Amino acid sequence: MSRIAILSALAQEQHGLLALLLQPQKVQRAGRDFWLGHLHGHSVVLALSRIGKVAAATTATALIEHLAVTRILFTGVAGGLAPDVQVGDVVVASSFVQHDLDASPIFPRFELPLYGRAVLACDEILSALLFQAARDHLAEASAAAPARHRVHRGLIASGDRFVSAQAQSVTLRRALQRAGHKALAVEMEGAAVAQVCLDYGVPFAAVRTISDRADDQAHLDFATFVREVASQYACAIIGRALRSLSNK
Ligand code: SAH
């Protein structure tokens, strides 16, 4: 029987999904709470990755080793990095890079030592499913209340830093660009989960709603967005994706 993990970084992103969980059962591992149950006909586990790459890697490993998950989806918020990625837009990851990984000059900047690559691809089928779910959700939401939010699909950069200054964001985007990486958004967990999933051969995909522009305003925009809308996006997009996913 397949079991899907649904990870979020923050409790505010998770509480809506938790409220919908049928037959919830709490299991504790690695100092974390894992919620087993059923959602839209699927056997699922809801978990908080916690914040940052190491915490997220521990959570992903515990999900695979102890809770026998067969697929992992991540839903959360991120800072917009590319100029056209605005607050309220949705970014579905096609791949991840760790923007703070630098073992140069031994390895090229951003390359994962001994993996022979910097970019970790997401599962194509799951990523396409999240993309469609996000587009359908935004189309329906804008029919009710017109808004110009967009859904993007592409590279997301992860690192152990909340990017909250325009200068930092520009430097980061340019450094990635020089190495041939066009990052749409920045967050703190995705690439770590992607690496664990690559190691174990577990399909992984992620959707992030843009809470801020990773600029001087980021801390204020982030707090408001997380409080007011993050959970609704998570419920709506993950709900749609699960409903259109076969539960074999
Ligand atoms: N004190 C905050 C810390 C949140 S850190 C709190 O607990 O409320 C920011 C979280 O949102 C991380 O999980 C990260 O993945 C994501 N995020 C949103 N905007 C970001 C940005 N501009 N830079 C890095 N991560 C960001």
Image (spheres, helix red, strand yellow):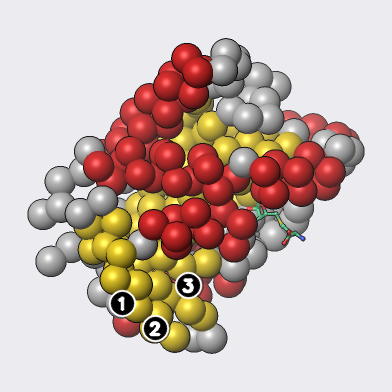
Q: CA distance from mark 1 to mark 3?
A: 11 Å
Asked if labels 3 and 1 touch by Cβ distance under 8 angstroms, the answer is no
Inspect the image, locate mark 2, and give the three-letter code of the amino acid beneath it: Val
Q: Closer to the N terminus: mark 1 or mark 3?
A: 3
Residue drawn 48% across the image and 46% down it: 234
**Residue 88, above or below 123:** above
Report if the beta carbon of the residue with label 2 is closer than 8 angstroms to ligand 1: no
Inspect the image, locate mark 1, and give the three-letter code of the amino acid beneath it: Leu
Residue annotated with mark 1: 67
The image quarter containing residue 102 is: bottom right
**Residue 119, above or below 94:** below
Mark in front: 3 vs 2: 2
Q: Is residue 166 left or right of residue 136?
A: right
Residue drawn 43% across the image and 40% down it: 236
**Residue 47, above or below 29:** above
Residue annotated with mark 2: 27
The image quarter containing residue 28 is: bottom left
- For label 2, the crowd category at 10 Å Cα-Cα, with few meaning under 14, some 14 to 19 and many 20 or more, is few
Q: Closer to the N terminus: mark 2 or mark 1?
A: 2
Is the N terminus in the top left, top right, bottom left or bottom right quadrant? bottom left
- For label 3, the crowd category at 10 Å Cα-Cα, with few meaning under 14, some 14 to 19 and many 20 or more, is many
Report if the beta carbon of the residue with label 1 is closer than 8 angstroms to ligand 1: no
Asked if labels 1 and 2 touch by Cβ distance under 8 angstroms, the answer is yes
Residue annotated with mark 3: 59
Q: Closer to the N terminus: mark 3 or mark 2?
A: 2
Inspect the image, locate mark 3, and give the three-letter code of the amino acid beneath it: Thr
Note whether residue 67 is visible.
yes
Under circle 3, the secondary element is helix
Residue drawn 22% across the image and 57% down it: 42
Q: Position of residue 19 (x, y in %)?
A: 45, 60
Under circle 2, the secondary element is strand
